[in-house]
Amino acid sequence: MTRGPTLPAHRLPYLPKPLDAFNAAPADEARALLLHCLRSLRWSRRLTDHRPYPDLDSLLAAADEAAYDLSPGDLAEALAGESLPDLPEDAYSAAHMALSAAHAAYEARFGHAFVIYLGDAHPNEAIDHILEGIRSRLANDPEEERVLAADELRRLAGQRLGQLLRGAGLHLPAAPPWGATNHNGAAPGK
C-alpha cells in the first residue's frame, strides 16, 4: 500500500501574546493596565518594575504576593477606586434600594467601599451575593474587615489581570469586572 508524498509540517509564525505586549510596553502603559486591576500606585509600580514575566502564572503569583504587602494607605487608595457594579437591567427598584441602603451602612461603619470577589457568580445572582456579603461583614470589627477587604481586593486584582492578559490585547476595558462595589461608578458584568 503506497501513501502519497508526505507534506512537511506546517508551522504557524510566532504570534505575540498579551503578556509579551505587557512585558514590552512602556512603563507608563504597564502601570495604567495594572492600576485598572488594583488601584494602588505602589502595587502597580512594583509589578511594572519586575518585568519581564516568563508566563502569566508568574505574573499572577507576583501580583498576589505584592497585594499582600499593601500598607493601610495603599489599601485605602485601592478601595477608593472601586465602583458599584451595575445591576441587571431588569432588576427591581427594591433591589437597587436594598443595595444602596446596605452599602451606605457598610461605608458608615468602616469608612470605605465594600468589595467582594464574586468568582463565577452569574450576573443575575450578583445582587444576592453582594447583599449577603455586606450583611455578614457588617458584624466584623474594623481590623478584621480591613483584612477581609484586602483579601477581596487581591482576588479581584488577580481576576482582572488574568482576564486582561488572556484576552486579545492590552486594551483597557471601560470598567472593571463584576466584584467591586462603591457608589462612585459602575462596573459591568464579567
Image (spheres, grey):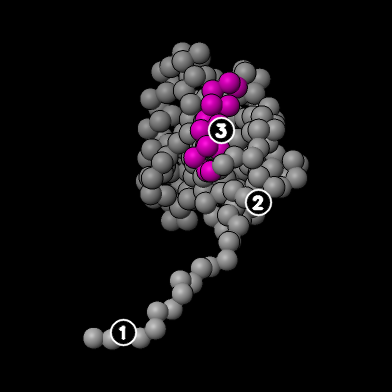
**Type of amino acid at the residue the image marks with label 2:** Ala
Identity of the residue drawn at 56% across and 33% down? 63
Mark linked to residue 63: 3
Pointer 3 and pointer 2: residues touching (CB < 8 Å)?
Answer: no
Image x and y of residue 138, in percent: 44, 22
Pointer 3 local density, CA inside 10 Å: few below 14, some 14–19, many at least 20: many
Q: Nearer the viewer, mark 2 or mark 1?
A: 1
Q: For the point 60% across and 35% down, which residue is it?
A: 38
Where does label 2 land, which residue?
A: 21
Give the answer, above or below, for where 57 lies relative to 138: below
Q: Which residue corresponds to the image point at 37% horizontal and 32% vertical from the top-left? A: 132
- Image position, residue 166 (x, y; %): 52, 51
- Amino acid marked by disc 1: Arg
Under circle 1, the secondary element is: loop
**Residue range of the region highlighted in magenta in the rendering:** 55-70
Instruction: Work out whether 188 lies above or below 133.
Output: below
Q: Secondary structure at mark 2?
A: helix
Q: Is residue 173 visible?
A: no
Of 123 and 90, nearer the camera is 123
Q: Which residue is mark 1?
A: 3
- In the rendered image, the vertical position of residue 154 relative to residue 87, given as above or below: above
